[in-house]
Image (cartoon, rainbow, N blue to C red):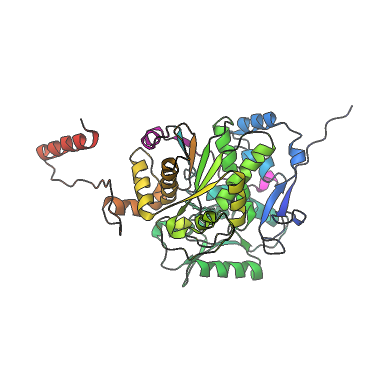
């Protein structure tokens, strides 16, 4: 009697330009021979030995369970992410499983009642960066277990990437190094890596200067590079597509709207969708909109020229600081995703992103400025008739609003430079006197709710 062979799932690094150029995942390699990007590729024939329906059942059963590590929102899809990784080397804080919020009140205001927000910021370090970092740091732990000499993991960042790297490295007991531009970041951005015990360097330069240093220490000193040119991160982030579809019982929405800076996240979204289609878990394609801040819009400018030319720009200052990037690393992958999903690119000015964010806050959300960019872009798509009233729309909210309170404080204090807020709501300061409070209270209820 023969037993069916145990499946031998495999994944490897592959050049996006030449599928024949391959490397094992435990090799320290960030780009192909021509300097182009790598991606993680999978043996799909092997995965297809399990039917789409069986994969759905398996993913559903694991969801929120406690069997290590499958209860994690990323590792519940382990065979589709890093199938060969030893479970003992997984570094996870049960990331993912972020809620998909039906924003029905805001949706009705905009004229798209079937509006949902995927709240990726409701996560361990407060942004979607956790989804990619759990995968990258797990791979580092496995390489160390196999005896590789890696003194530390490192990234250049001013915000969410350094927070996620520091937390996962701390959980694994691996040294993390973070390069930040001195004096150019807020207390909130600095405190996460500091608290998690990362080696934090504040350098007399800007973000690009930090990037140069991190590249040198990775090339010359064997420090493992955790910036998003490392495609292990994209592999973890692609689970956002898998999770959204599972949350909708594999019913495909019409639109996915996502803010983009370095463009790793939209590449990941596209990659997740590609795999769902290829494996037969979904049968229809959603459309994708990438939303950029007008101050940092190189993808938008390229889109306007049908992607025939790409010119890096010098990104100007924007409140959406995590997407203030003029030369996005994952440009090529993002263009492929946009072409494959009938994509569009929109942009939002500072005033537009601030107002959209505040407006949605008034319906119970608490948006980061990047989500504000996505919401402002959505409003434009609705106005242009591209998004229609019966469409199901999912906005990817990339970080928790509590990580970015400064712009809200300034908005409600009416102190945002160059912006006149439409709906400020500063606290009302009064003496502690019942009659004064009562008359003001009744006036405010009437003013706001028109009773
Ligand atoms: C990193 C980040 C982005 C941009 O993602 P990319 O992959 O660089 O396009 C958007 N929003 C937040 C909050 C982020 O941390």
Q: Is residue 34 above or below residue 402?
A: below
Displayed quadrant of residue 248:
top right
Q: Residue at x 72, y 31 (%)?
A: 51
Q: Where does the image place residue 40, in percent across and percent down from the top left?
A: 68, 50
Q: Residue at the far right: name it.
A: 1
- Whether 94 is among the magenta residues is yes
Question: Which quadrant would the C terminus be assigned to in this image?
Answer: top left
- Whether 372 is among the magenta residues is no
Residue 324 or 25: which is nearer the viewer?
Answer: 324
Q: Answer yes or no: is residue 64 visible.
A: no
Residue 232 or 117: which is nearer the viewer?
Answer: 117
Q: Residue at x 56, y 54 (%)?
A: 306
Position of 151 compared to 385: left or right? right
Displayed quadrant of residue 379:
top left
Q: Answer yes or no: is residue 178 visible.
A: yes
Question: Which quadrant would the N terminus be assigned to in this image?
Answer: top right
Position of 142 compared to 299: left or right? right
Displayed quadrant of residue 360:
top left
Residue 158 or 307: which is nearer the viewer?
Answer: 307
Q: Is residue 115 above or below residue 144?
A: above
> Magenta span covers which residues?
86-112
Q: Where does the image place residue 176, in percent across and percent down from the top left?
A: 56, 60
Q: Residue at x 58, y 48 (%)?
A: 338
Q: Where does the image place residue 7, in percent across and percent down from the top left?
A: 78, 38
Q: Residue at x 36, y 36 (%)?
A: 109
Q: Where does the image place residue 76, in percent across and percent down from the top left?
A: 62, 38
Position of 80 compared to 163: left or right? right
Position of 406 compared to 95: left or right? left
Q: Residue at the far bottom: name it.
A: 204
């Amino acid at each position: 009697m023969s037993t069916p062979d145990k499946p031998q799932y495999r994944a490897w690094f592959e050049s996006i330009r030449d599928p024949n150029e391959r490397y094992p995942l435990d090799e320290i390699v960030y780009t192909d021979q021509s300097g182009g990007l790598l991606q993680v590729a999978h043996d799909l024939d092997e995965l297809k030995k399990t039917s789409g329906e069986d994969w759905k059942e398996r993913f559903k059963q694991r969801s929120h369970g406690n069997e290590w590590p499958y209860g994690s929102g990323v590792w519940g899809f382990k065979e589709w992410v890093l199938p060969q990784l030893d479970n003992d080397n997984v570094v996870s804080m049960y990331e993912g499983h972020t809620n998909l919020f039906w924003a029905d009140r805001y949706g009705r205001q905009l004229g798209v009642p079937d509006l949902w927000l995927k709240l990726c910021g409701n996560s361990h370090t407060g942004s979607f960066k956790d989804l990619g970092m759990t995968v990258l740091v797990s791979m580092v732990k496995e390489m160390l277990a196999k005896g590789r000499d890696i003194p530390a993991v490192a990234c250049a960042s001013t915000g969410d990437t350094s927070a996620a790297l520091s937390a996962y490295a701390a959980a694994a007991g691996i040294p993390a190094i973070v390069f930040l531009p001195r004096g150019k970041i807020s207390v909130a951005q600095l405190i996460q890596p500091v608290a998690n015990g990362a080696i934090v360097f504040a350098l007399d330069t800007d973000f690009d200067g930090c990037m140069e240093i991190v590249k040198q220490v990775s090339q010359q000193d064997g420090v493992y590079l955790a910036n998003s040119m490392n495609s292990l991160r994209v592999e973890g982030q692609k689970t956002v597509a898998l999770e959204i579809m599972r949350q909708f019982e594999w019913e495909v929405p019409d639109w996915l709207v996502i803010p983009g800076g370095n463009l790793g996240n939209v590449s990941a979204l596209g990659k997740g969708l590609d795999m769902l289609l290829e494996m037969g878990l979904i049968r229809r394609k959603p459309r994708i909109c990438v939303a950029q801040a007008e101050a940092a819009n190189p993808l938008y400018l390229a889109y306007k020229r049908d992607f025939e030319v790409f010119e890096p720009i010098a990104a100007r200052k924007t409140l959406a600081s995590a997407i203030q990037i003029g030369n996005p690393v994952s440009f090529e992958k993002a263009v492929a995703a946009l072409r494959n999903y009938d994509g569009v690119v929109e942009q939002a000015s500072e005033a537009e992103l601030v107002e959209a964010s505040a407006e949605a806050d008034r319906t119970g959300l608490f948006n980061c400025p990047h989500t504000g960019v996505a919401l402002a872009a959505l409003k434009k798509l609705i106005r242009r008739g591209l998004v229609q009233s019966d469409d199901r729309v999912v906005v990817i909210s990339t970080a928790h609003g509590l990580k970015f309170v400064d712009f809200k404080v300034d908005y409600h204090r009416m102190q945002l430079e160059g912006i006149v807020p439409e709906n400020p709501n500063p606290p009302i300061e009064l003496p502690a006197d019942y009659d004064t409070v009562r008359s003001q209270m009744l006036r405010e209820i009437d003013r706001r709710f028109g009773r």
